Amino acid sequence: MSTPFRSHKSKRTSRSHKKKTDRGLPPLRIAVLGPTGQCGSCIVDELLYRGHDVVGVSRNPPDAWKEGENSSHRGVYESVAVDVRDEGMLRDVFSSGFDAIVCAFAPGIKDLKSAYENGVEGHGGVKRALLGSSHSGSFIVIGGAGSLHTMNRRQLVDETGFAYSWWYTWPDEHLNYMRVRARTHGNFLFSLFIAGFRWARNNVEHPGWFSWLFRPIAWTYLFLAKRKLTSPQTRSLITSTRTALTMWEGVREKKWTFLSPPGQLRDQGVRTGRYKMFIDSEEDPAVEAVDGAIYNEDLAVAVADEIEGPRMTFLHWSVVGRVGLAAW
């Protein structure tokens, strides 16, 4: 069954006559599964900016791609509508001659009760579709920070008290980012929860002249927050991406690589073009990444660099960059 691709006609150019990318490389044709998410959208931006051709793959991908404020797209954007649960159609898409495929798939989080199941089933379907396809290029999976190993040689998601213990170490700047991002995405209750968590933690950790008056309220809030953040439902999205990593470990039929963002990932930031890479394993944990941060814009640079010059095949890795250069 052939799959119809929808292209942004005004940018269509014959590949045989296209100029080389900004690095002097011939343009590549790359599929991005999940092109509108937090990571996926920045990856599409970066690839188009470099002059590569991108096909956005999801149930309802945008027909055209809006250029970023600080970039001019030189590549061609196309889209194909595919439900990740339709493994046959997804296999056909993966067999369409791509030079590389990026999997930025993530299940919806409106219903946390089904997030783990949807995440595991989704990643499992993607894996089966890829293994059954003729794709021979790179396959980059974007995971989550919970899969990274800590200095205790345990994955972050397995640390005692996760995710409460993780949140508790975040600087005010990152909690403020999380609060604003939640509000921007219409999740006002979550935004209020984060604001309350930050206040309660600071009341306990940085007492002032009158903070003791509200100390019982702060302790009660933190108690309830811990119960919420350590619940299986709250952790479900993170544990599902850890399972996705497990799915690929030991596979050699396809050239996969698994990128886990660092502990603090922020969007709407600044593209510096600089980052540090860390390979993560139980024997050699990427501790710097667990406690590190990066803007999505620079994470996208790392993904594009890996596509243009693969170095992390069959590895679990992360990247860390500078933050605090914009609103957060």
Image (spheres, rainbow, N blue to C red):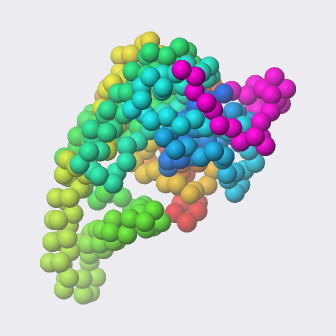
Residue 2 among those drawn in magenta:
yes
Residue range in magenta is 1-28
Residue 223 among those drawn in magenta:
no
Q: Main secondary structure of the magenta part?
A: loop
Q: Residue drawn 58% across and 60% down?
A: 325
- Residue occupying the far front of the picture: 1
Q: Which of the two residues, 135 or 281, is positioned nearer the viewer here?
A: 135
Q: Where does the N terminus fall, quadrant-wise?
A: top right
Q: Is residue 210 above or below residue 273?
A: below
Q: Is residue 202 above or below residue 135?
A: below
Q: Examine the image and state in which quarter residue 317 appears.
A: top left
Residue 204 appearing in the image: yes
User: Residue 242: horizontal and vertical position, in percent?
Assistant: 32, 35
Q: Which of the two residues, 24 or 137, is positioned nearer the viewer here?
A: 137
Q: Is residue 165 left or right of residue 274?
A: left
Q: Residue drawn 37% across and 43% down?
A: 107
Q: Residue drawn 50% across and 29% down?
A: 140
Q: How many marks?
A: 0
Q: Is residue 253 left or right of residue 246?
A: right
Q: Which of the two residues, 101 or 148, is positioned nearer the viewer here?
A: 101
Q: Residue drawn 48% across and 40% down?
A: 59
User: Residue 92: horizontal and vertical position, in percent?
Assistant: 52, 21
Residue 276 appearing in the image: no
Q: Is residue 25 left or right of residue 84?
A: right
User: Residue 260: horizontal and vertical position, in percent?
Assistant: 42, 38
Q: Is residue 147 above or below residue 209?
A: above
User: Residue 5: horizontal and vertical position, in percent?
Assistant: 63, 32
